[in-house]
Image (tube, rainbow, N blue to C red):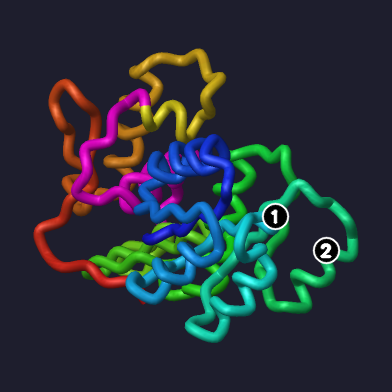
Amino acid sequence: MNLLIVDDEELIREVIKEYSIYEGYHIFEAEDGNQALEIIKKNDIDAIVLDIMMPKLDGFSTYKEIKKIKNIPTIILSARSDEYDKLFGFELGIDDYLTKPFSPKELIARIKAITKRNHPEENRFVYQDLIIDFQGYAIYIEGKEIKVTPKEFEILAYLIQNKNIAVSREALLSQIWGYDFFGDDRTVDTHIKMLRNSLGKYRDIIHTVRGVGYKFEIKETSSSI
């Protein structure tokens, strides 16, 4: 998924970029509105994080121009917390508004939320008679719901989002349990083992990558609906 970060502060862009890449987003960057418009004209952008106070073309003016090209889910990011700015942004059609200083984790969660609302087809993953309902935290095989724990579901969802990519145990610990979790690799291995048991005939979609971690991989083409 392509994410465009528009902010004249390089440090802000780098922080958002670091967290976004970790989540599997492909990043485009712009330091002002004019650059952002050129990127949007040439690339298929799925979501935008847009600062208000920028040189040459401010965020609100940039968003108005963006809407003339394409409707793209957008989060306004601003040091200004005035109610007027928020209301004006929502009247223009933005999807969310976050004030600085902000939590990168919260921003990522909001990006995920607006992209899900605007791309409902991405709320489910289907492979043969296996269905993963991301929004409902449910797994179905042959029409029957398979019971898994929330952590097991989150592991599977994260591996699917990064399909065909070897994900380290450390990355899974950080992503699923949080950066401040003090457990070890065995925590991940135990949950993977239980998840594989629950998946039954589909247990092999989770591959072990020796010396690294795990990878979601299937032989046939999957589909999202």
Give the percent coordinates (x, y) of residue 121: 42, 75
Magenta stretch encompasses residue 161: yes
The answer to which of marks 2 and 1 sits earlier in the sequence is 1
Q: Looking at this view, name the residue that lies furthest to the left.
A: 219
Measured along the vertical axis of the image, is residue 109 above or below residue 92?
Answer: above
Per the model, the C-alpha gap separating discs 2 and 1 is 11 Å
Magenta stretch encompasses residue 128: no
Find numbered disc 2 in the image and state the secondary structure of the residue it sits on: helix
Find numbered disc 1 in the image and state the secondary structure of the residue it sits on: loop
Closer to us: 202 or 48: 48
Whether pointer 2 and pointer 1 mark residues with C-beta atoms closer than 8 Å, the reply is no
Q: At 69% across and 40% down in the image, what residue appears?
A: 102
Q: Magenta segment, which residues?
A: 146-170
Closer to us: 175 or 191: 175
Measured along the vertical axis of the image, is residue 16 above or below residue 179?
Answer: below
Q: Quadrant of the C terminus?
A: bottom left
From the image, tell me which residue sits under label 2.
85
Crowding around mark 1 (Cα neighbors within 10 Å: few <14, some 14 to 19, many 20+) is some
Indicate left or right for 208 with 123 as reference. left
Q: Which numbered circle lies on residue 53?
A: 1
Measured along the vertical axis of the image, is residue 151 above or below residue 79?
Answer: above
Give the percent coordinates (x, y) of residue 128: 22, 69
Closer to us: 76 or 177: 76
Q: At 60% across and 70% down in the image, what residue appears?
A: 62
Q: Is residue 149 visible?
A: no
Indicate left or right for 12 with 17 as reference. right
Give the percent coordinates (x, y) of residue 210: 13, 25
Q: Disc 2 marks which amino acid?
A: Asp
Q: At 40% across and 55% down in the image, what residue appears?
A: 28
